[in-house]
Image (cartoon, coloured by chain):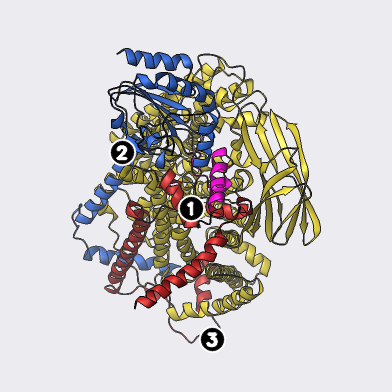
Chain colours: A red, B yellow, C blue
């Protein structure tokens, strides 16, 4: 049993070490595109509702430099986003973290969607019930199943609705 | 002097609105036509009065009367004349005055009409209109007065916000305002019907075109806003789900749901309560939108700064909302519609489903927009909700809407046969599937989102085009007309129906473009020294150098010269530039682009390191199909114009409808 | 045309007769919906009032906060403190940022004044507003700042004080009341005058 644990740990280390070495890059090697890929999910702190990747202010420039530095240190995008949320508050994230009260922004639309779907189906059902309780008007409305030769019944409907046949 | 005239005239306008509200109420309650006529005259007076005020502001802007705070804030001596005029709506106080002017124009026009057949509603209509106009005039007079004087006279003004100097931004706000104010008319008629307890279709029939015109302007405003963002904001996009954008999008959603469900009422007499609710919702959302944008509760790129008017707008919103709600509840039993649906596979059900999706999008957008306020209340931190949320929640809903858009016109009123529906859908589905399969390997498409989206769009487009084909064919067969005559008379005789299909086509074309940009946009940012190049898609762009020159109106322009090669062939010299308004130190980034049917190559300067360094950082976007968004928008507007265009035939039909409305048995 | 138009109404009347019993005006569902909408609007209203909430006023209590100092800029060797820890002292709370140009005008003044008053019961506390740590440290080194400094973690302090921008300075008296608020770079005369006034009390 223990052997497996050690083996597993060894394997993990073997996998992680070269990764860690590789992850250390010089700041200059990080491309602007990589920085923007992270910055896209952050908001400019001083001008609201502007994504960080397109914000021209000095503050945003500093933030992007920090992202660049952290990328060079080998940090992943989620780690960097966490860092910014922890230091500058979660309001800098363009997507609210899915925890605590923030879940409401995700849950409420879904709940309302289902609720609306329920009400929609129910009212449709009730309207349908009202319809079946009565003599169906559709009997006269939909054309009787006559011997359809070439006439497309749909076209017939169009003709009727457009009043072409008047 | 001129400003004083404007101020006095604005004050009298408020008095006229207040008088109209009281007089119309007297006219309604005591049933005194003289009072109503007097109220009507008072409303007619508001427009000229507000026009005088607006003219006074425009005069002050042109003359550079910087003793007025508003003039000093939004204009400067060096500004070109047309900008001085459009500065009327370049700031909070002025745009509120402008809003008042547009509202007054619509009220004026509404009062000049006879409203035959619905005269009994007029006193209350005047009342609702007068209260609305009165509120806005109150704000203009006492809270955000454009004639407020500065304690000193500055030598020059601050100038218009550079972001607002783009032609798109000059036309976009008036369009939105027009949309908003023209929706006030149907709301007033709805409320009058509600108060009267006369909740049949009169108000809908009589205000149908007003609604459509309002909707046209709202749509136009939204599309122009997108174009403005694309040209000026410099992020290669056209829509960011910004709170301010949402503020105008939400009333549009409610109005669109209304325009659809109203057809059930006209055809079947059903959903009266629902439609009443939708028009109220539209109006409330319009006030809510104005409230968000202007109070600064949710700060956003182009919100006006924090302003004292917030609580007043909120109060008005509550008044409108609860007033309408209480009225609806009081009249609830009158709405009892005993109609029914014969089949789930019917036009009625399809419209209802359409409403369900539209309202779902509305709710999701509302929650996203309101969440910053909500989260600040609960957690103390103002949480932002950005694009990812809206894309995830609204994306699938839009897809469902597009599918419905293609299929719904095939359903029939009362009941359609599933078998027949299946038959009409089978071939288009097969053709679409083959087409998408080919695209999947040829283009190639990736993921599952864009193939699915493109499938839906292609499918619905085929179905919509078939609608045109079937209609034309029916006329050709029935009347023996040639293809062209049949097609054009089809359009002319059935404007609403085929205008609607044009609108659908426009939306589909826009959706096609949106899929292209959303799923296949490429972008890169790179530092280039003179002579270096970047590659993006098929394009290569070489940086030739920078130049700096003074532009008109205290501008310092830094312009890059870039050669764009398409597959190695020089196609265009691009000159993106940075503009600096030297006096106010406001920078602007103006992108440049090469547009083709297939895509845009869009580039902007991120950072220029000066002549000595001879290097600059550029950001380039490869935006596939972006121009389809604008083309679709154009088709959309044409379709709306077709649907809304008044014609003599229609007037005759309307007259006939009014006569037949007197007979209880008239249905269709 | 005619056959369609007569249809719906024929059935309408029958149904009208069938469902002529009018239901109560207010049902639980409607009431719930109404209450829900009312709650939403009330919440919005509250949010509005809240967002327009006034900043601390001179003479009012200073909002409490917790700071976690930058390494090397601690107060009495502690890595973090709350406002209460400073009770009995005058606190000059200064919001700044490395990207802020106007902050540079007052940086030397603040440091000099701190050195002059540090033994007289006056504490200077710098709070860096939306600033990245390497840049902040660069700024602190550039101006030889020695008084305690901390980042505005999660933006909570600047929010509590409702700052309108940087620089902004709040002088808090020995009892934890805001004695003076200054927007923009502070001048030597004002700073000394305000501190001396409090020291005399």
Q: Residues within 10 Å of mark 3 (few under 14, many from 20)?
A: few
Question: From where the camera sits, is residue B207 visible?
Answer: no
Q: Are marks 1 and 3 in contact (CB under 8 Å)?
A: no
Tell me the quarter of the picture where residue B364 sits: bottom left
Magenta highlight on residue A63: yes
Magenta highlight on residue C27: no
Q: Magenta stretch?
A: A44-70
**Quadrant into which the C terminus of chain B falls:** bottom left
Tell me the quarter of the picture where residue B162 sits: top right
Q: Which residue is at 31% across, 38% downward?
A: C46
1 or 3: mark nearer the eye? 1
Q: Chain of mark 3?
A: A
Q: Nearer the viewer, residue B467 or B296?
A: B296
Image location of residue B495, percent across then percent down: 56, 58
Circle 1 residue: A80
Q: Nearer the viewer, residue B16 or B370?
A: B370
Tell me the quarter of the picture where residue B373 sits: top left
Q: Secondary structure at mark 3?
A: loop
Q: Secondary structure at mark 1?
A: helix
Mark 1 or mark 3, earlier in chain: 1
Circle 3 residue: A149
Q: Chain of mark 2?
A: C
**Quadrant into which the N terminus of chain B falls:** top right
How many angstroms separate mark 3 from mark 2 (CA)? Answer: 68 Å
3 or 2: mark nearer the eye? 2
Callouts 1 and 3 on one subunit: yes
In the image: residue B305, left or right of residue A126: right
Circle 2 residue: C46
Does residue B435 sit above or below B101 in this rendering?
below
Question: From where the camera sits, is residue B602 visible?
Answer: yes
Does residue B464 sit above or below C91 in this rendering?
below
């Amino acid at each position: 049993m223990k052997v497996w644990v050690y083996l597993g740990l060894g394997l993990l280390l073997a996998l992680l070490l070269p990764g860690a070495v590789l992850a250390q890059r010089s700041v200059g090697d990080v491309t602007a595109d990589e920085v923007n890929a992270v910055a896209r999910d952050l908001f400019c702190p001083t001008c609201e509702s502007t994504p960080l990747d397109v914000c021209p202010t000095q503050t945003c420039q500093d933030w992007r430099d920090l992202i660049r530095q952290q990328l060079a240190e080998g940090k992943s995008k989620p780690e960097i986003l966490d860092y910014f949320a922890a230091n500058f508050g979660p309001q800098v994230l363009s997507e609210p973290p899915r925890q605590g009260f923030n879940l409401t922004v995700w849950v409420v639309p879904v709940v309302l969607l289902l609720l609306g779907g329920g009400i929609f189906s129910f009212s449709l059902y009730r309207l349908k019930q009202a319809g079946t309780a009565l003599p169906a008007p559709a009997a006269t409305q939909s054309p009787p199943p006559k011997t359809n030769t070439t006439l497309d019944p749909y076209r017939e409907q169009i003709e009727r609705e457009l009043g072409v046949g008047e | 002097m001129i400003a004083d005239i404007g101020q006095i005239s604005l004050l009298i306008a408020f008095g006229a609105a207040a008088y109209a509200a009281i007089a119309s109420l007297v006219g309604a309650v005591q049933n005194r036509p003289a009072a109503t006529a007097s109220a009507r005259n008072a409303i007619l007076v508001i427009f000229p009065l507000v026009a005088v005020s607006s003219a006074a502001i425009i005069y002050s802007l042109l003359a550079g009367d910087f003793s007025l705070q508003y003039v000093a804030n939004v204009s400067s001596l060096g500004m070109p004349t047309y900008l001085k005029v459009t500065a009327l709506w370049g700031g909070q106080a002025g745009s509120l005055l402008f809003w008042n002017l547009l509202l007054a124009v619509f009220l004026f026009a509404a009062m000049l009409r006879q409203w035959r057949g619905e005269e009994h509603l007029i006193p209350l209509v005047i009342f609702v209109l007068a209260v609305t106009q009165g509120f806005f005039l109150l704000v203009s007079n006492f809270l955000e007065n454009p004639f407020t004087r500065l304690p000193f006279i500055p030598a020059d003004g601050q100038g218009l916000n550079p972001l607002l100097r783009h032609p798109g931004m000059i036309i976009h706000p008036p369009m939105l305002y027009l949309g908003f104010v023209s929706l006030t008319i149907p709301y007033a008629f709805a409320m009058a019907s509600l108060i009267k307890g006369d909740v049949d279709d009169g108000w809908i029939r009589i205000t149908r075109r007003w609604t459509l015109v309002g909707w046209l302007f709202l749509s136009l405003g939204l599309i122009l806003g997108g174009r403005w963002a694309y040209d000026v904001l410099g992020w290669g996009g056209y829509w960011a789900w910004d709170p301010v954008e949402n503020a105008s999008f939400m009333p549009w959603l409610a109005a669109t749901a209304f325009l659809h469900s109203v057809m059930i009422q006209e055809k079947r007499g059903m959903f009266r309560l629902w439609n009443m609710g939708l028009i109220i919702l539209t109006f409330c959302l319009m006030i809510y939108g104005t409230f968000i944008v202007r109070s600064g509760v949710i700060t956003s790129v182009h919100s006006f700064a924090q302003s004292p008017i917030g609580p007043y707008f909120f109060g008005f919103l509550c008044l409108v909302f609860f007033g309408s709600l209480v009225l609806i509840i009081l009249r609830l039993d009158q709405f009892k519609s005993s109609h029914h649906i014969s089949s789930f596979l019917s036009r009625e059900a399809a419209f209802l489903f359409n409403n369900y999706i539209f309202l779902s999008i509305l709710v999701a957008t509302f929650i996203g927009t309101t969440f910053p306020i909500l989260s600040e209340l609960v957690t103390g931190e103002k949480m932002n909700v950005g694009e990812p949320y809206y894309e995830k929640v609204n994306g699938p809903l839009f897809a469902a809407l597009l599918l419905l858009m293609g299929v719904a016109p095939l359903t029939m009123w009362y009941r359609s046969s599933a078998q027949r529906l299946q038959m009409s859908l089978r071939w288009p589905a097969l053709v679409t599937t083959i087409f998408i399969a080919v695209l999947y390997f040829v283009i190639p498409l990736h993921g599952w989102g864009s193939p699915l989206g493109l499938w839906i769009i292609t499918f619905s487009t085929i179905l919509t085009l078939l609608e045109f084909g079937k209609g034309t064919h029916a006329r050709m067969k029935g009347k023996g007309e040639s293809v062209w005559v049949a097609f054009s008379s089809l359009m002319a005789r059935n404007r609403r129906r085929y205008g609607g299909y044009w609108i659908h086509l426009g939306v589909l074309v826009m959706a096609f473009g949106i899929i292209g940009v959303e799923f296949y946009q490429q972008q890169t940012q790179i530092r280039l020294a003179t002579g270096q190049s970047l590659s993006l898609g098929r394009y290569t762009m070489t940086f030739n150098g920078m130049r700096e020159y003074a532009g008109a109106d205290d501008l310092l322009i830094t312009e890059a010269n870039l050669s764009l090669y398409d597959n190695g062939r020089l196609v265009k010299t691009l000159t993106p530039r940075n503009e600096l308004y030297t006096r106010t130190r406001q920078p602007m980034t103006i992108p440049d682009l090469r547009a083709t049917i297939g895509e845009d190559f869009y580039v902007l300067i991120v950072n220029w390191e000066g002549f000595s360094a001879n290097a600059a950082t550029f950001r380039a976007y490869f935006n596939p199909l972006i121009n389809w968004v604008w083309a679709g928008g154009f088709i959309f507007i044409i379709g709306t114009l077709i649907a809304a265009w008044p014609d003599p035939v229609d007037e005759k039909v309307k007259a006939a409808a009014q006569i037949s409305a007197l007979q209880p048995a008239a249905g269709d | 045309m005619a056959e369609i138009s007569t249809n719906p109404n024929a059935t309408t009347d029958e149904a009208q007769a069938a469902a002529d019993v009018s239901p109560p005006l207010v049902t639980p569902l409607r009431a719930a919906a109404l209450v829900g909408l009312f709650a939403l609007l009330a919440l919005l209203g509250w949010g509005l009032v809240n967002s327009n909430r006034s900043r601390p006023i001179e003479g009012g209590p200073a909002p409490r906060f917790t700071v976690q100092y930058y390494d090397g800029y601690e107060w009495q060797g502690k890595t973090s403190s709350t406002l209460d820890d400073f009770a009995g002292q005058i606190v000059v709370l200064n919001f700044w940022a490395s990207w802020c140009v106007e902050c540079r005008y007052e940086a030397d003044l603040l440091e000099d004044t701190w050195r002059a008053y540090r033994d007289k019961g006056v504490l200077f506390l710098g709070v860096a507003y939306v600033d990245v740590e390497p840049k902040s440290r660069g700024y602190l080194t550039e101006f030889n700042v020695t008084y305690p400094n901390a980042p505005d973690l999660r933006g909570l302090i600047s929010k509590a004080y409702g700052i309108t921008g940087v620089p902004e300075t709040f002088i808090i008296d020995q009892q934890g009341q805001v004695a003076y608020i200054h927007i923009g770079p502070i001048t030597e005369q004002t700073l000394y005058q305000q501190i001396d006034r409090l020291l005399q009390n």
